[in-house]
Amino acid sequence: MLVLPAPRPEDGPEDASRQGVTIYLCALGCDASAEMGLLTRELAQVFPARVEEARPRKLPVPPESFSRRRSQYHSTVLLAWMAGKIPANQRPVLGVVQVDLFVEELNFVFGEADPLRRVAVISTYRLHSDYSGGEVRPDVYQARVVKEAVHELGHVFGLGHCPDPRCVMHFSNSILDTDRKSKEFCRRCRMAFRIR
């Protein structure tokens, strides 16, 4: 667990919006118009920041992130590529993809973040399905998208995983974990949160 310094009163959420922090969104290899609209509205309510589309608003998924061995896309490679394509003045940035993501240690990931480069990505690939493989209702899908986006941006802003299964920063080992948690930070994570 990452231990963060306690926020100073002058670094509180109210101050962050006065500092002009903007979170940028970028679709990667897909038309994520519905997700971008949803995240523009929802993230602005969770984070003390403006939310805007990056320029360009859409980029391709880099072919070098695809693993033939796994038939998935390596999210760490994707993050490094994003950091090279999206200028520093358009960060933090959250990419949205519709492909299946992985990291070496896990079968799949819903997303990943690189706090040093201030880039994150979420995948909608596994968010559409219910537990038996069928489609979920649109409101369930939308809630999942928001939770995963807030989670990855939480990492960008310095938060680690949280042991509270209801906190948005709790690690999702399966879609059940994502459905169980809220889109909100627990009290402990709220206290540790610092936007930059």
Image (cartoon, helix red, strand yellow):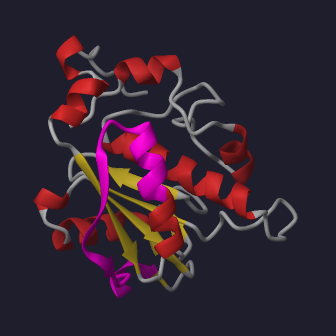
Residue ID at (28%, 46%): 115
- Report whether residue 53 is seen: yes
Q: Tell me if 90 is positioned left or right of 76 in this view.
A: left
Q: Where is residue 28 in the image (x, y as percent from the top left)?
A: 39, 77
Residue ID at (65%, 66%): 126
Vertically, is 110 above or below 32? above
Q: Where is the N terminus found, in terms of image quarters?
A: top left
Q: Tell me if 131 is positioned left or right of 74 in this view.
A: right
Q: Is residue 54 part of the magenta span, yes or no?
A: yes
Q: Which of 113 and 35 is in front in this view?
A: 35
Q: Position of residue 4 (x, y in %)?
A: 31, 22
Q: Where is the C terminus found, in terms of image quarters?
A: top left
Q: Is residue 84 part of the magenta span, yes or no?
A: no
Vertically, is 148 above or below 16? below
Q: Where is residue 150 in the image (x, y as percent from the top left)?
A: 47, 45
Q: Tell me if 63 is positioned left or right of 186 in this view.
A: left
Q: Where is residue 173 in the image (x, y as percent from the top left)?
A: 65, 47
What is the magenta range?
Answer: 39-66
On the image, which quarter does residue 139 sit in? bottom right
Residue ID at (47%, 64%): 37
Residue ID at (39%, 45%): 44
- Report whether residue 102 is seen: no
Number of numbered discs visible in the structure rendering: 0
Q: Which of 55 and 134 is in front in this view?
A: 55
On the image, which quarter does residue 89 sit in? bottom left
Vertically, is 162 above or below 141? above
Q: Which of 39 and 59 is in front in this view?
A: 39
